[in-house]
Amino acid sequence: MRSVENRGGAVQIGKGACVSIIFTLAAVLVFALAVKLFSLSSSVITPVNQVVKFVAVFLGCFFCIKPGKAFFKGLLCGAIVAVVTYFLFAIIAGSISFGWLNVLDIVCGALAGGISALIAAALRSKD
């Protein structure tokens, strides 16, 4: 019985990560188009990318994480999203370099996931 519960949590985390990654890729493509069309300054790219990642993690956790150890499932989901999106964009850019800012990004993604999952669980428990 316990392995079924664990598998359910893994499925929730996987679905949440997939939703977040797909949203991130779509939003970054739209933003890249906006940067190109409107000649936006390069100083707006980093803050907008951070907001996109946080919104993506929130949406993934909100739609896929169920109550019951939600914080931990959200932590894992956010960390997975941060790692996978880093490698996807590094591959697209053609260079991989890992440093302390990447570690901070993973920690922030995990915290965003944990908080998002808690919010989602609290809203679902009211239903």
Image (tube, rainbow, N blue to C red):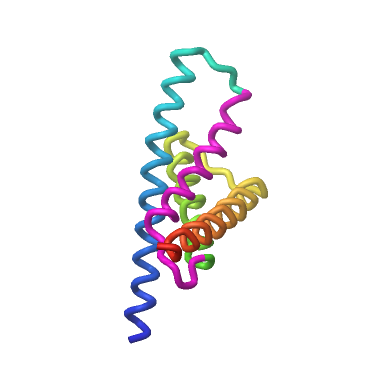
* Region rendered in magenta: 43-70
Residue at 49% across, 66% down: 70
Which quadrant does the N terminus fall into? bottom left
- Residue 40 in the image, given as x and y percentages of width and height: 54, 17
Q: Is residue 71 magenta?
A: no
**Farthest right residue?**
100
Q: 51 above or below 62?
A: above
Residue 79 in sight here: no
Left or right? Give the position of 65 relative to 108: left
Residue at 35% across, 57% down: 15
Q: Pick the residue in front: 39 or 86.
A: 39
- Residue 76 in the image, given as x and y percentages of width and height: 50, 62
**Farthest bottom residue?**
1
Q: 46 above or below 1?
A: above
Which quadrant does the C terminus fall into? bottom left
Left or right? Give the position of 12 relative to 118: left
- Residue 111 in the image, given as x and y percentages of width and height: 59, 56
Res 13 → quadrant: bottom left
- Residue 17 in the image, given as x and y percentages of width and height: 41, 54
Res 10 → quadrant: bottom left
Q: Pick the residue in front: 126 or 48.
A: 126
Q: What is the total number of numbered labels drawn onto the structure image?
A: 0
**Farthest top residue?**
38
**Farthest front residue?**
127
Q: Main secondary structure of the magenta part?
A: helix
Residue 25 in sight here: yes
Q: Pick the residue in front: 95 or 109.
A: 109
Residue at 44% across, 68% down: 67
Left or right? Give the position of 2 relative to 74: left
Q: Is residue 58 magenta?
A: yes
